Image: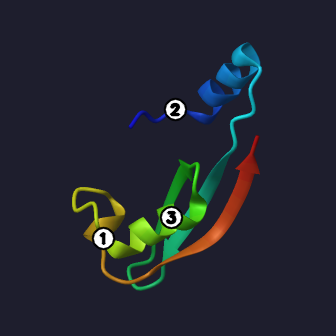
Amino acid sequence: MTFYSAVALRQLAEVEQINIMFWIYAIYNRSVDKYYIGQTANLEQRLKLHNSKEFKSSYTAKFGGKWELIYSEKII
């Protein structure tokens, strides 16, 4: 899977004249007082992945407790 910055996605959308929709989001883990900021095309699924600890090498999987969505913004 390839990840692009928000600027790169906007430039790609302008060049290709397509609508790429994605979310920028911030989550918070109260039990360890940590924040995480990310981007995704599927916000609901991504939040589930953060809390399932499915990707053991990811930053959020290193911490116990629940990640809560505290901010999201849809980018088109």
Q: Position of residue 63 (x, y in %)?
A: 30, 74
Task: Return the residue at label 2.
Answer: 4
Which mark is on residue 45?
3
Near-viewer residue (45 or 53): 45
Q: Which residue is mark 1?
A: 53
Tell me if 42 is positioned left or right of 72 in this view.
Answer: left
Please tell me whether mark 2 sits on a helix, a strand or a loop: loop
| Placement of the N terminus among the 4 image quadrants | top left
Q: Are marks 3 and 1 in contact (CB under 8 Å)?
A: no
Task: Kindly report the distance in space between the C-alpha atoms of the residues bearing marks 2 and 3.
Answer: 18 Å
- Which label sits on residue 36? none
Q: What element does badge 3 sit on?
A: helix
Residue type for callout 3: Gln
- Single out the mark in the foreground, 3 or 1: 3
Looking at the rendered structure, the secondary structure element under dot 1 is loop
Q: Provide residue 8's location: percent of width, then percent of height.
A: 60, 25
What residue is shown at x 75% (from left), y 33% (from top)?
19
Whole-Å distance between the Cαs marked 3 and 1? Answer: 13 Å
| Image position, residue 45 (x, y; %) | 51, 64
Coloration of the structure image: rainbow
Q: Residue furthest left?
A: 56
In primary-sequence order, the first of circles 1 and 2 is 2
Nearer to the camera, 54 or 34: 54
First of labels 2, 3 by sequence position:
2
Residue at horizontal 74 percent and vertical 26 percent from the top: 18
